[in-house]
Image (cartoon, rainbow, N blue to C red):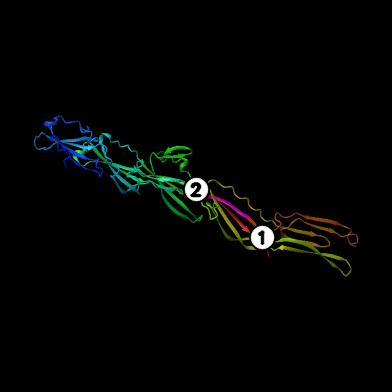
């Protein structure tokens, strides 16, 4: 299509994009009219009003097979508005993981091409406007985050056109939707659901460790960094290098310590269940009575009578087992003192008292034969027995408290035995 029908220059144009300003064209030039000196490559078009952004990219004879005074001057827009039309949806494979992606092809002057710009990990231009909006979300820590497309891959290819190839190169830039990948697994031991989160990170992306920032590429080479150690919250991070520039950082809940129940109470890292164990409870002394017996001679003797508030029990008892996880060695729970029953024995000329081993409070047995005994002179005595360490069955006893290594930390487990119903 001839846009300039003057005898000196005639233009033939093409439109590489739907934008009418993005024009590639050549002009047929009569050397006898404009001169035989060819302009420098990259120089601007002489008609700056009509073609303010176009530069000379190629010159050739109109008919290469014969000498002619006619030449073709090829011009291209120096800064094509490419972002509106150079995109396509695709998938990017980084280390075997596929991500939603957008591929963009850019035609760039070789003299201005910089393989470091834009930097890897840079945010993709939001052009066309709202075509690739950022995504707002709330992460596992209830923090507001925004997911955007970032530069993940780039490659350069020559233009399959002898006219453009001398001054331009095509760079394909692949932008991935940088969203974390989550996986949920049920933890049968703690009856909670744990998450695993994988985040794609560029080599120079910064990570804060103890208030100091480090590039992830440096942390990936430092196995002793606190960043890779199991936290008190049960979080363990690992890293895998996917390529020269990309790393996958995995954040795993080894133990879900933040889980709550329906009442809002934290139950993460805790477990408990009811069971039955065999246990023994000794009898409990209620009282000691001395019943009088009168002989035919008129003398009175006394016979001890023992009553128990609880009889001995040996058999199955309800028990509660409770456990908790912690990163550091826990303090064990103080155990309930074992019930230690004791016997009572008093022997006199008047009676013999024998009480088997029982739990009891302080017991005092007094003896006084008075002044009228025909055999023995008056004798008064007192026998004191201290209370046992338990005077009755406790409602429950903490019978064991143990600790062992578990999932990089420690598992503490307590067992409580409940007293059987009184009979």
Q: Which is in the foreground here, disc 1 or disc 2?
A: 2
**Residue 399 within the magenta-colored segment of the rendering:** yes
Residue at point 31% right, 49% down? 89
Residue at image point 60% right, 59% down: 319
- Secondary structure mostly seen in magenta is strand
Residues drawn in magenta: 398-406
Q: Is residue 298 above or below residue 131?
A: below
Q: Residue 161's quadrant in the figure?
A: top left
Secondary structure of residue under mark 1: strand
For the N terminus, the image quarter is top left
Where residue 277 sits in the image (x, y, percent)?
Answer: 60, 60
The residue labelled by disc 1 is: 281
Among the 4 quarters of the image, the one containing residue 70: top left
- Pick whichever, 12 or 372, lies toward us: 12
Disc marking residue 234: 2
Q: Distance between the Cα atoms at labels 1 and 2? A: 40 Å
Question: Disc 1 or 2, which lies upstream in sequence?
Answer: 2
Viewer-nearest residue: 10 or 191: 10
Q: Name the spot of residue 254 as percent of width and height, x first.
A: 48, 50
Residue 260 or 84: which is nearer the viewer? 84
Total marks placed: 2
Residue 62 position within the rendered picture, expressed as x and y whole percent measured from the top left: 12, 37
Residue 50: horizontal and vertical position, in percent? Answer: 22, 36
């Amino acid at each position: 299509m001839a846009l300039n029908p003057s005898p000196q220059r005639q233009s033939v144009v093409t439109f590489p994009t739907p934008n009418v300003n993005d024009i590639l064209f050549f002009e047929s030039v009569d050397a006898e009219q404009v001169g035989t000196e060819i302009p420098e490559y990259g120089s601007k078009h002489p008609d700056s009003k009509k073609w303010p952004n176009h530069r000379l990219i190629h010159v050739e004879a109109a008919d290469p097979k014969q000498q002619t005074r006619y030449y073709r001057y090829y011009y291209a827009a120096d800064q094509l508005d490419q972002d509106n039309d150079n995109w396509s949806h695709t998938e990017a494979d980084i280390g075997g993981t596929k991500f939603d992606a957008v591929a963009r092809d850019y035609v760039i002057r070789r003299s201005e091409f910089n393989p470091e710009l834009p930097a890897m990990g840079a945010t993709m231009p939001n052009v066309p406007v709202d075509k690739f909006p950022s995504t707002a979300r709330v992460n596992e820590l209830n923090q507001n985050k925004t997911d955007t497309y970032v530069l993940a891959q780039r490659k350069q290819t020559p233009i399959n056109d002898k006219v453009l190839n001398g001054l331009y190169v095509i760079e394909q830039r692949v932008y991935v939707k940088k969203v974390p990948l989550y996986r949920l697994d049920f933890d049968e031991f703690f009856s909670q659901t744990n998450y695993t989160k994988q985040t794609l990170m560029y080599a120079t992306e910064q990570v804060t460790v103890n208030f100091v920032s480090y590039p992830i590429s440096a942390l990936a080479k430092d196995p002793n960094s606190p960043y890779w150690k199991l936290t008190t919250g049960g979080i363990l991070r690992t890293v895998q290098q996917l390529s020269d520039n990309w790393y996958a950082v995995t954040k795993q809940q080894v133990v879900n310590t933040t889980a709550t129940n329906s009442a809002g109470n934290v139950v993460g890292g805790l477990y408990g269940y009811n069971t039955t164990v065999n246990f023994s409870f000794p009898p409990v002394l209620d009282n000691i009575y001395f019943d009088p017996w009168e002989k035919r001679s008129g003398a009175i003797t006394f016979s001890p009578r023992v009553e128990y508030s609880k009889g001995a029990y040996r058999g199955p008892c309800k028990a509660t087992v409770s456990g908790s996880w912690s990163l550091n060695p826990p303090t064990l729970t103080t155990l309930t003192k074992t019930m230690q029953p004791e016997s009572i024995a008093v022997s006199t000329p008047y009676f013999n008292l024998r009480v088997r081993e029982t739990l009891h409070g302080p017991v005092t047995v007094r003896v006084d034969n008075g002044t009228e005994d025909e055999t023995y002179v008056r004798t008064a005595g007192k026998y004191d027995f201290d209370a046992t360490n338990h005077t009755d069955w406790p409602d429950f006893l903490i019978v064991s408290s143990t600790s062992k290594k578990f999932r990089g930390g420690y598992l503490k487990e307590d067992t409580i035995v409940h007293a059987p119903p009184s009979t």
